[in-house]
Image: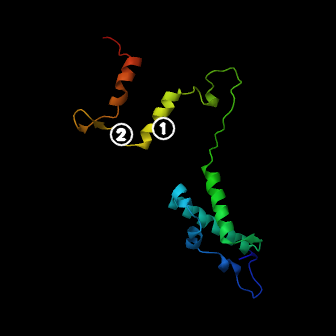
Amino acid sequence: MRNSEQHGRNGADTRRDLPSVDAVLKSCGDLEAIWGRTGVVRVVKSELAHLRTRLGQRSPCDIRKNEIVAGVLTALTDADRSTLTRIFNLTATTLHTNLGRALLPQRAIDAMSQVPSMPTNLEYDLQSGARGERDDHYAAIRNAVLPAKSA
């Protein structure tokens, strides 16, 4: 397919030349494995709707499948990009509330990244073999940092 306008030489509506969602998905390679089927389908439908609108306005656009897939990849990549940017704190304020506050030690970052990647005993007491309390995991640390007042 080619750069198109709404009506071709024979007066036919070229929006009918747009590939189906399924046809585009078949050309998407491993995008579904990376971003999940639901997200890829949503973006494919959005891309096709955008092209359909442009064709309806008689705006030139490329409706080849490989160009549509390229647009889908760009949209997925842009949506996946973080809006947070690494900066230098040159304010002389150590714990600047607008700049992310205190930095975490690497040990804490490593621990946080390991836990969600595997099953854990969040609410399971390994000693009793029964349901546990999630608060038990930080109780000893909490008590050491915030000791209870004596009566």
Q: Is residue 39 above or below residue 136?
A: below
Residue 127 lies, in percent from the top left, at 24, 32
- SS at circle 1: helix
Confirm whether residue 49 shows in the render.
no
Residue located beneath label 1 in the image: 113
Q: Tag 2: Cα neighbours inside 10 Å, few (<14), some, or many (≥20)? A: few
Q: Which residue is mark 2?
A: 120
Which of the 4 quarters of the picture holds residue 123?
top left
The kind of residue on which mark 2 rests is Thr
Q: Earlier in the sequence, mark 1 or mark 2?
A: 1
**Residue at (59%, 68%) from the top-left corner?**
27
Q: In the image, what residue occupies the spot 34% across and 34% down?
A: 134
Q: Nearer the viewer, residue 116 or 51?
A: 116
- Quarter holding the N terminus is bottom right
| Residue depicted at 62% across the width and 44% down the height | 82
Give residue 114's position: percent from left, percent from top.
Answer: 45, 38
Q: Quadrant of the C terminus?
A: top left
Say which mark, if any, is on residue 92.
none
Report x, y in % for residue 56.
72, 74
Name the side, left or right, on which 59 lies relative to 21. Answer: right
The residue at 61%/27% (across/down) is 97
